[in-house]
């Protein structure tokens, strides 16, 4: 490479081409501009005249200079000039390339990989051994090196040739968590000396300094970091009107943020049909720090939200998964007692209301209204019997996933529900009467609760000492009783029983919901038990205590790009570990669920903040973009083209052709853009068809049928023009799929068996056409073989086509129909065939013949369809010269038949255009009578 | 004409092709002529004719049968009824059909020869309506009257000549007739001078009608240009056509001046017409120039 100042040449030998320039100068000078040849009658007058100036005989010097510049630019351009050529001193020794690989890298991951491969290329040129470490996924020391021949014994990092890393780059992906410093430092064990290039994501995280220190102990560290914009979503909080979500921003002040001024936060969730949609959207101005965003979501929508996402962010931190803490369950309370005079503290529902308050939407009211509201939980407090239909509704609701919570009480104890057989809405059979402990007539103490078994949903809840039970309803000992008990008293009698009903469940608490029978409702345990049972929460993130003892299944995981995917078969996680945890390699971010509760583990927690990574002074900071060597070839080529373009204009000006070219271009430009092509086509179509009456036929796809139909309408148009004042434009073939139909008064539709069915859009168009006054003449063209009871292929096809059409009831043309006298008086309607029936819209029932008139009082409506099979188009068809296209009948009779067919056509068009004007003749006597007065 | 394969179809087709321009030219000319046809067409003086001209008092020498007795009876004097002099004239038309006349710069494509032919036809129709006899120089027939002559003139007008520039030939013109020269007079002026001189010698008066294309008057050319004549016989190359404009226009003006001088000396009239102007005004001028009082 030849380097001259800041410019290097990759192919300097091309520059020798510059030597040719003087020769070119001489050549170009010798060739004058080409003349225009013109024929001119006055040339005789010109003979003998001489040019005053001979200078332009040769190309002017400035034009020559222009051309020389163009050629010189080409020569220099192809010699490969490079601005800031990279002449680097090769470094040696092993190299560690660290990539943070966090979610913050995700939006620019491909650029990161490119940068990584560029670094590897450089290392490859320097023939250095390289180890690529992703900080979020460092090689584990325990795994060891499988091909230990090349690596030292306890060295975890593998140093390989830079080339060998290239295929592995595609497999790297950002992780939805931040690196763990200890793992990383552990991975460095055994390395003695190495230079480090750290591709930083630009955010500070815990342990970064420790990692840096560990690397600096090995050798110099260079950091690649570019100013970027970060966006993250904090945990969602529920508010009165909806939810708020904090948007964390960083880097707004930098030049990288000029692209847009606001970001959108979207709330996703399934719509009623289960398809994921955007349920809410909020726009936030870009700002550093924390900006709370409020979503105005009604409870119905809020309960459906599954995640919040910053639009187009592509990062795990820009996604917040919503879990049960966002949802408010709807709890319906129904009490058996209707005694309004009782004290409030004795009310069956008082403690339930208090327990659910702030955790769920409590609804109360008539049973029918409540079940219609489809709540998540229905609580029946001491309700023994329900009406038959109510019971059936409740059972249905439960089977579909409802949670029915029942409390015992005096009424249930006194009733005979579930005495002999199991009630579908009670988990167990009950013994009559129940029992009272510690009362005046009993010999026992009030009983305490036994600690909850491990299988119980209450497992892990502490039991206060002051919870005692003094009365309860007793379960009958049944074979499956023990499986249904989830809480027992100290003596083993069931306190809470549960059974599954369909997808839902029924739970019976064997004591009352007030403090009559036990002190349970007075204790905090009652609230905790209700929470566990009904999964209602206060709206905060679940505490460790809430999740203690539960095992949570991973349902969905979030990857570094913020994409959700099914977790597959990952092992379940203990509830305590999830509560308050941050996402890590072992506990990936995602959605965790037990059977009663769903918990989201999000990347960005409540305490997390976006803070830029700060590096000490002894770290070499490389800019984001390396100082690129810029190839100058395009600029030189562009300059050459530019000068050549100027040369064209100058040459035209010299030869006097500039003006004409400019005018040509101006004309071409002014003539060209006149609206969209399609629009003008549509306009042309509309103008062509609306200027005059235009008959149209539906294109069937069969060229013969289409030709006959077209020529038939040509013939009919001629007959109309010669006999009536209707002078139609030449007919058109229309495609019902694409053309506008409503400009045609009449559509002739020959039916072929191969005809494709119209699309749904076309059907809509046809129906609209018929409703707005258009008429379709269906012609099955089989009048010779069709008849009553005979199904022809054409007829069958017509039935198929017409099935989706809005066709009114039909009848054969009655003798007094206006079609028989709209222009000519006709009795039958032959085409190529005679005798086939013609069907049109049936007259309304009860039409009476007017007095003294041969026809009925029918002057409403033009039939939208006329259906027949006489192949009229064939009878109407003429060649362009005016001769009949098809033979009709034989001899004079045939001519007569053609004439009648033409008359039918005239009548039909008249009928379409004038409606039932002729039918108004029934009113003539009345009108005359009025005029006479 | 050599018809090698004398089939009717071919003959017919060629005849059709030949006749094709005739009806439009005739019709066009007829239409143009109609705009000027205003009733009877006399000499505007007493003479032999059919139409009444004036009554004048009888003078000595008037034959008795010339006296209009009915008019005389209404007064004391005798009156003679004079009729308008209606004498047929012979008009010779020379229309330049050379290639130069095929030049046009107009968007409508109207060539000088088209305009000349139209004017010639319309003038012929007008003159024949007025009873005059017309001949076309290239036909070499004596002046005649009637539609057959008209058709022949139309035919002859649609035949183009190959030569670059045309030259008039007044040898066959009848003495004391009229002559009309329709040309762009771009060719050698000496031939025109000779023809006019020959005609003037025989007492023929006439009109030189100069027909020019607008481009020939403005010379809107620039840049390096090779000019060739319409027939291709002449070639002239210039490097800057714009520089030639003034000198060309000088030469054109000189030619016009020379033609006008020539006309004045011979007692003829000279008119210049541009193809972008209306044909009707040209015809009006031409007709008056031919028919106008001496």
Image (spheres, helix red, strand yellow):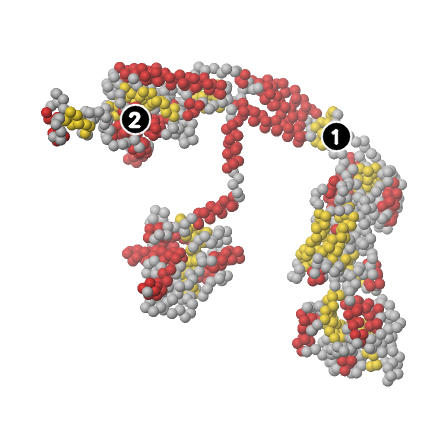
Residue B241 position in % (x across, y down):
48, 20
Which secondary structure, mark 1? Answer: loop
Note whether A611 is above or below B144 in the view shown: below
**Residue, disc 2:** B287
Which secondary structure, mark 2? Answer: helix
**Residue, disc 1:** A85
How far apart in space, not on screen, are marks 1 and 2 (Cα)?
88 Å
Q: Is residue B250 left or right of residue A507?
A: left
Q: Could you tell me if residue B25 is visible in this image? A: yes
The quadrant of the image that shows the C terminus of chain A is: bottom left
Residue at the image point whose x is 50% and y is 32% from the top = A664
The extreme bottom residue here reads: A441
Tell me if mark 1 has few (under 14), some (14-19) or many (20+) residues whose alpha carbon lies within 10 angstroms of its own.
Answer: many
Note whether B58 is above or below A621 in the view shown: above
Q: Nearer the viewer, residue A106 or A14?
A: A106
Residue A515 position in % (x across, y down):
82, 75
Residue at the image point whose x is 68% and y is 59% from the top = A270
Residue A600 position in % (x across, y down):
77, 58
Q: Check chain identity for marks 1 and 2: say if they share one.
A: no
Q: Is residue B169 left or right of residue A162?
A: left
Note whether A359 is above or below A511 in the view shown: above
Q: Nearer the viewer, residue A127 or A342?
A: A342
Residue at the image point whose x is 53% and y is 30% from the top = A662
Q: Could you tell me if residue B5 is visible in this image? A: no
Q: Is residue A165 left or right of residue B162?
A: right
């Amino acid at each position: 490479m030849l380097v001259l100042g800041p410019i290097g040449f990759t192919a300097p030998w091309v520059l020798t081409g510059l030597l040719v320039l003087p020769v070119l100068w001489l050549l170009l000078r010798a060739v004058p501009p080409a003349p225009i040849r013109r024929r001119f009658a006055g040339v005789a007058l010109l003979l003998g005249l001489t040019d005053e100036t001979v200078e332009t005989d040769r190309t002017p010097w400035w034009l020559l200079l222009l051309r020389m510049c163009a050629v010189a630019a080409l020569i220099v351009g192809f010699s490969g000039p490079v601005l800031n050529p990279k002449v680097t001193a090769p470094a040696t020794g092993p190299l560690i390339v660290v990539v943070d690989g966090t979610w913050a890298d995700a939006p620019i991951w491909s650029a990161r990989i490119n940068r990584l491969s560029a670094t590897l290329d450089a290392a490859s040129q320097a023939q250095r051994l390289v180890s690529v470490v992703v900080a979020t996924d460092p090689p584990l020391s325990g795994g060891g090196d499988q091909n230990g021949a090349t690596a030292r014994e306890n060295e975890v990092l593998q140093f390989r040739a830079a080339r060998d890393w290239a295929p592995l780059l595609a497999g790297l992906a950002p992780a939805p968590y931040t690196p763990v410093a200890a793992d990383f430092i552990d991975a460095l064990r055994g390395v003695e000396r190495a230079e480090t290039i750290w591709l930083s994501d630009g955010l500070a995280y815990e342990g970064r300094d420790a990692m840096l220190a560990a690397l600096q102990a090995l050798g110099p560290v260079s950091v690649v970091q570019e100013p970027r914009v970060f966006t993250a979503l904090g945990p969602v909080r529920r508010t009165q009107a909806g939810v708020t979500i904090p948007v964390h921003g960083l880097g707004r002040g930098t030049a990288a943020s000029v692209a847009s001024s606001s970001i959108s936060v979207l709330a996703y969730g399934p719509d009623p049909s289960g398809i994921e949609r955007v349920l809410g959207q909020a726009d936030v101005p870009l700002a550093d720090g924390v900006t709370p965003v409020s979503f105005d979501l009604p409870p119905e929508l809020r309960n459906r939200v599954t995640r919040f996402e910053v639009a187009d962010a592509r990062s795990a931190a820009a996604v917040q998964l919503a879990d049960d803490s966002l949802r408010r369950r709807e709890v319906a309370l129904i009490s058996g007692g209707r005694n309004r005079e009782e004290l409030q503290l004795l009310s069956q529902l008082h403690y339930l209301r208090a327990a659910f308050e702030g955790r769920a939407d409590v609804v109360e009211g008539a049973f029918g209204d409540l079940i219609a509201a489809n709540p998540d939980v229905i609580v029946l407090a001491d309700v023994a019997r329900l009406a038959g239909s109510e019971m059936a509704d409740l059972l249905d609701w439960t089977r579909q996933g409802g949670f029915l919570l029942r409390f015992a009480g005096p009424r249930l104890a006194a009733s005979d529900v579930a005495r002999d057989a199991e009630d579908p809405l009670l988990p167990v059979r009950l013994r009559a009467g129940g029992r009272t402990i510690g009362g005046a007539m009993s010999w026992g103490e009030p009983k305490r609760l036994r600690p909850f078994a491990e299988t119980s949903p209450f497992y892990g809840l502490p039991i206060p000492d002051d919870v005692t039970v003094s009365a309860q309803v007793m379960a009958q000992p049944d074979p499956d009783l023990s499986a249904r008990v989830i809480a027992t008293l100290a003596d083993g009698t069931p306190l809470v029983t549960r059974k599954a009903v369909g997808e839902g469940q029924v739970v019976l608490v064997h004591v009352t919901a007030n403090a009559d029978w036990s002190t349970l409702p007075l204790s905090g345990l009652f609230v905790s038990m209700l929470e566990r049972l009904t999964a209602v929460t206060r709206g905060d993130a679940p505490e460790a205590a809430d999740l203690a003892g539960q095992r949570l299944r991973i349902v969905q995981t979030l990857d570094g790009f913020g994409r959700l995917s099914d977790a597959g078969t990952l092992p379940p996680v203990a509830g305590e570990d999830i509560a308050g945890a941050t996402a890590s390699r072992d506990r990936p971010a995602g959605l965790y669920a037990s059977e009663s509760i769903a918990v989201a583990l999000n990347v960005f927690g409540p305490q997390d903040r976006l803070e830029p990574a700060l590096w000490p002074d002894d770290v070499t900071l490389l800019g984001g973009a390396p100082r690129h060597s810029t190839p100058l070839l395009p600029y030189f080529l562009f300059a050459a083209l530019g000068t050549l373009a100027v040369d064209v204009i100058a040459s035209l000006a010299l030869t006097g052709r500039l003006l004409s070219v400019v005018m040509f271009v101006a004309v071409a430009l002014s003539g060209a853009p006149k609206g969209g092509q399609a629009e003008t086509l549509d306009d042309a179509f509309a103008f062509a068809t609306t200027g005059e009456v235009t008959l149209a036929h539906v294109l069937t796809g069969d060229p013969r049928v289409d030709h006959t139909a077209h020529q038939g309408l040509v013939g009919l148009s001629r007959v109309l023009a010669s006999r009536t004042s209707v002078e139609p434009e030449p007919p058109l073939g229309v495609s019902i799929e694409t053309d506008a139909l409503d400009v045609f008064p009449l559509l002739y539709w020959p039916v072929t068996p191969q005809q494709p069915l119209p699309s749904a859009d076309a059907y809509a168009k046809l129906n609209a056409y018929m409703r707005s006054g258009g008429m379709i003449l269906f012609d099955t063209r089989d009048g010779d073989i069709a008849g009553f009871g005979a199904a022809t292929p054409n007829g069958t096809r017509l039935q198929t086509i017409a099935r989706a059409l809005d066709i009114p009831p039909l009848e054969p043309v009655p003798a007094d129909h206006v079609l028989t006298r709209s222009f000519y008086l006709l009795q039958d309607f032959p085409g190529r065939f005679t005798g086939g029936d013609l069907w049109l819209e049936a007259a309304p029932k009860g039409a009476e013949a007017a007095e003294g008139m041969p026809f009925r009082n029918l002057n409403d409506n033009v039939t939208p369809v006329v259906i027949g099979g006489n192949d009229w188009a064939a009878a109407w068809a003429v060649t362009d010269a005016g001769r009949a296209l098809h033979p009709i009948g034989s001899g004079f009779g045939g001519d007569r038949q053609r004439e009648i067919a033409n008359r039918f056509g005239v009548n039909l068009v008249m009928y379409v255009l004038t409606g039932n004007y002729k039918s108004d003749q029934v009113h003539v006597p009345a009108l005359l009578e009025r005029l006479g007065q | 004409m050599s018809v090698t394969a004398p089939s009717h179809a071919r003959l017919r087709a060629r005849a059709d092709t030949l006749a094709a321009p005739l009806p439009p030219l005739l019709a066009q000319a007829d239409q143009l002529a109609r705009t000027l046809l205003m009733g009877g067409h006399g000499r505007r003086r007493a003479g032999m004719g059919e139409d009444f001209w004036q009554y004048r008092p009888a003078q000595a020498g008037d034959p008795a049968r010339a006296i209009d007795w009915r008019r005389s009876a209404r007064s004391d004097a005798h009156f003679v009824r004079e009729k308008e002099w209606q004498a047929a004239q012979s008009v010779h038309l020379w229309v330049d059909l050379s290639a130069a006349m095929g030049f046009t710069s107009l968007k409508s494509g109207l060539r000088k020869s088209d305009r000349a032919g139209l004017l010639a036809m319309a003038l012929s129709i007008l003159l024949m309506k007025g009873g005059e006899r017309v001949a076309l120089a290239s036909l070499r027939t004596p002046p005649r009257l009637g539609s057959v002559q008209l058709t022949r003139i139309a035919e002859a007008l649609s035949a183009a000549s190959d030569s670059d520039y045309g030259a008039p030939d007044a040898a066959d013109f009848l003495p004391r007739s009229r002559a009309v020269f329709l040309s762009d007079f771009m060719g050698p002026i000496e031939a025109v001078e000779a023809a006019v001189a020959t005609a003037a010698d025989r007492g023929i008066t006439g009109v030189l009608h100069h027909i020019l294309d607008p481009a020939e008057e403005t010379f809107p050319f620039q840049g390096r240009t090779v000019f060739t004549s319409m027939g291709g016989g002449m070639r002239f190359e210039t490097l800057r056509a714009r520089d030639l404009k003034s000198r060309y226009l000088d030469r054109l003006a000189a030619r016009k001046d020379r033609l006008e001088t020539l006309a004045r000396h011979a007692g003829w009239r000279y008119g210049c017409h541009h193809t972008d102007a209306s044909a009707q005004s040209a015809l009006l001028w031409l007709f008056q120039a031919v028919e106008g009082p001496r």
